[in-house]
Every structure is written in C-alpha cells, then in structure tokens.
C-alpha cells in the first residue's frame, strides 16, 4: 500500500501539536490512507519538541526532529521532505490553517496520476490591510517572473516522490518552495481551499520578516533587478546628453554661472541611483557568497527513534 508522508513545519507550536496529530490521524484512518506525520520543530523555544516526543511515543507513525536553532520555514519544509519515506508527501502548516479535509482530495488526484497537487487559496483569511497590499504587489511580481498566477498559491501541496527527489537534489540552499514546484513542472493540478483561522498561538510573521522574504524570493528567481541597473544607467546617459548640450550652449553664450540648482539636483539623483544600484548588486553578491559557502540549510539537534528516509540513512 502506498504511504503518504505529511510534513509539518512547526515553530513554537506546543499548543497545536497534540490537536493536529489527533485531527490528522483520525481523518487519515477514516480514509484508510497509510500515513506518517513528520513534525519539524524549527528551533522552537517552547515545548514543541516535547509535545512531538509525547505524540511519537503513543504512535510510531508520528516522527519528529528538532533544529539546533530557528532556520525558517523553508528549511523546515526541506528537512521534512528529506525525512519523508512516503510515495507522496503533503506539506502543510501545523496550525491547521490549511484544512486537513483537502488531503483526501489531493490523495485521490495523486492516485489518478497527478504528480503535483497545488493548494490554492480561495480567500486569504484574515489579514491586515497592509499585509494584503504587500502580498498583492509581491505576488504580482512573482507571477510575472514565473509567468504563472502565483497570487493564490501556498505552501500547502502534495508532491509525488519523483518531485520530492527533484527538489531535494537541487544544489541551492536559498529556496522558495512555493514557486519551485511551479518551476519543476510535472503533471500538475490544483485544488482550492479556504484558509482557516488559527486556533492556538499566533502567526510568526512580522511585516519586516515578510519584507525580507519577498526580496529574497524575488532575487532568487530573477536577475531582473540587475537589468534595471543597466536601464537606470542608460536613462541617465540620455539625460546627461541633453544637459550637456544645454550647459555648453549656456557657456558659449556667456551665461554659465547660473544652474546651481541643476548641479545639486544632479548630484542627488545620480548619487542616489548609484547607491541604489550598488545595493542591488551587493544583494546579489551576498546571495552568491551565501551559496558559495555551501553551509547546510539546517542543523538537526535531536530526532525521534523512528526516523527513516534519506536523512537517517546519512547518519
Ligand atoms: N514556521 C516555521 N518556522 C518559522 C516560522 C513558521 O516552521 O520560522 C511554521 C509555523 O509553525 C507554521 C507555518 O510555518 O506551521 C506557518 O507559520 P504561521 O502560521 O506563523 O504563518 P501564517 O499562517 O500566519 O502565514
Ligand atoms: Mg498559520
């Protein structure tokens, strides 16, 4: 019988673990799906890992690891996929904001031969106005870059073993899981779901962390900002030609002392764009530097005894 691995990144989610285990186990048993639950505690500072241990003692289908510190959701997802030994894997939030009731539908589609089942949000749930605007702009840019509609995409998806292996074999360390499955291709279908309210605990995202997430993800998928630097350069050269002619004409006609305002403005504009461009280039250099160092994406400090999959084989 085929095995379904469910990967659940968890950061400071002690209140959610027991409930999530219970809800998922009940649903999957009822649907007669053979499963394993893989919790990845992302360096939680509360009792998340203890809760995972407790659940794992009661049921060997529950597995878990703990990171040595917080490495971020991307790292947790990839660690979970690394541990997964299933023929298919579902990635979902452990706060049940991704409704488990969608899993049987994803499973059926997988059985029908689809290799990627994308969870698509029908509503964004309750978010602040600022958050909505920001997410809107971010997904517009991402959709443009990916040439696919990313607006409603989420991290909630089912992946076939083949796709999991493709993702795990990617050499880069800075990843954007949500877009990578689009990039990878394969036979894809989507299912819609409605984002649920969080019952316990609170969201881990601040405006600042979202901002960083957006910049990192855009630059990891595109070199367009670098080309913008070139465009900026061309525009200033054209502009400078016009001004050069004007300045020369003034010099020849003997009215050259004026134009101090122009000088100030030019210094400001050009200085600003040079610094901005350097910043953009610097950002890419930083990314190259990070990748070149080749540090692991995450460090595991503890794991439950029942862990199999690629990760355990390496030990
Ligand atoms: N998460 C994680 N590492 C982090 C931040 C979040 O593994 O550094 C997990 C978190 O435990 C949850 C999921 O990612 O299962 C989504 O996080 P959250 O619910 O805070 O985000 P939101 O649903 O508000 O977008
Ligand atoms: Mg959530």
Image: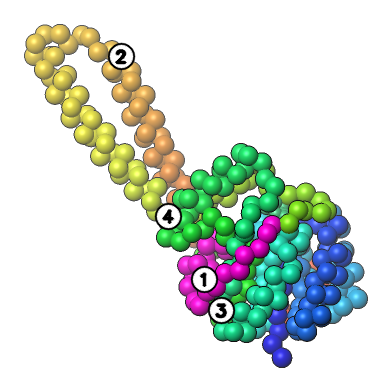
Give the x, y percent position of residue 245.
Answer: 14, 24
Which image quadrant for residue 274?
top left
Question: Which of marks 4 and 3 precedes in the sequence?
Answer: 3
Cβ–Cβ under 8 Å for marks 2 and 4: no
Q: Which residue is mark 1?
A: 170
What's the distance in space between the residues labelled 2 and 4, CA to CA?
39 Å
**Marks 1 and 4, how far apart at CA:** 23 Å
Name the mark on residue 144. Answer: 4
Is 83 part of what is drawn in magenta? no
Q: Marks 1 and 3: in contact by CB < 8 Å? A: no
Vertical comparison of 258 with 273: above or below: above
SS of the residue under disc 3: loop
**Residue identified by numbered label 3:** 115
- Tell me, yes or no, whether the highlighted magenta stretch contains residue 183: yes
* SS category of the residue bearing label 1: loop
Task: Identify whether 301 is placed above or below 250.
Answer: below
Horizontal arrangement in the rendering, residue 7 relative to residue 159 (left or right)? right
Quadrant of residue 161 in the image? bottom right
Secondary structure state at the residue bearing disc 4: helix
Labelled pair 3, 2 in contact (Cβ < 8 Å): no
Disc 2 target residue? 261
Please tell me the numbered disc located at residue 51: none
| Left or right position of 89 against 176 | right
Q: Quadrant of the N terminus?
A: bottom right
Q: Which residues are magenta?
A: 175-195
Residue occupying image coordinates x 82% and y 66%: 20
Query: Few, some or many C-alpha atoms within 10 Å of disc 2 (few <14, some 14-19, many ≥20)?
Result: few
């Amino acid at each position: 019988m085929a095995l379904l691995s469910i990967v659940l990144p968890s950061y400071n989610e002690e209140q959610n673990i027991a409930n999530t285990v219970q809800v998922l186990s009940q649903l999957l048993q009822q649907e007669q799906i053979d499963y394993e639950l893989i919790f990845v505690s992302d360096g939680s500072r509360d009792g998340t890992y203890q809760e995972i241990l407790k659940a794992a003692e009661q049921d060997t289908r529950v597995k878990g690891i703990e990171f040595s510190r917080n490495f971020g959701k991307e790292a947790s997802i990839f660690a979970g996929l690394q541990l997964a030994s299933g023929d298919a894997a579902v990635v979902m939030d452990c706060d049940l904001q991704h409704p488990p009731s969608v899993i049987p539908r994803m499973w059926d589609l997988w059985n029908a031969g689809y290799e990627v089942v994308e969870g698509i949000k029908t509503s964004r749930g309750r978010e602040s106005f600022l958050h909505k605007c920001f997410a809107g702009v971010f997904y517009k840019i991402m959709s443009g870059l990916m040439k696919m509609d990313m607006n409603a995409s989420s991290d909630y998806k089912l992946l076939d073993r083949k796709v999991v292996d493709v993702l795990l074999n990617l050499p880069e360390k800075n990843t954007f899981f949500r877009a990578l499955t689009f990039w990878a291709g394969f036979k894809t279908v989507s299912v819609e779901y409605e984002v649920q309210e969080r019952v316990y605990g609170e969201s881990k995202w601040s405006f600042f962390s979202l901002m960083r997430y957006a910049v990192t993800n855009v630059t990891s998928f595109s070199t367009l900002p670098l080309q913008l630097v070139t465009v900026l350069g061309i525009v200033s050269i054209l502009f400078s030609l016009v001004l050069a002619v004007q300045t020369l004409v003034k010099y020849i006609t003997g009215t050259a002392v004026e134009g101090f305002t122009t000088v100030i403005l030019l210094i400001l504009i050009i200085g600003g764009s040079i610094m901005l461009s350097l910043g953009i280039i610097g950002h890419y250099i930083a990314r190259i530097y990070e990748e070149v160092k080749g540090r692991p994406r995450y460090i595991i400090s503890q794991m439950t005894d029942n862990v199999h999959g690629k990760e355990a084989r390496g030990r």
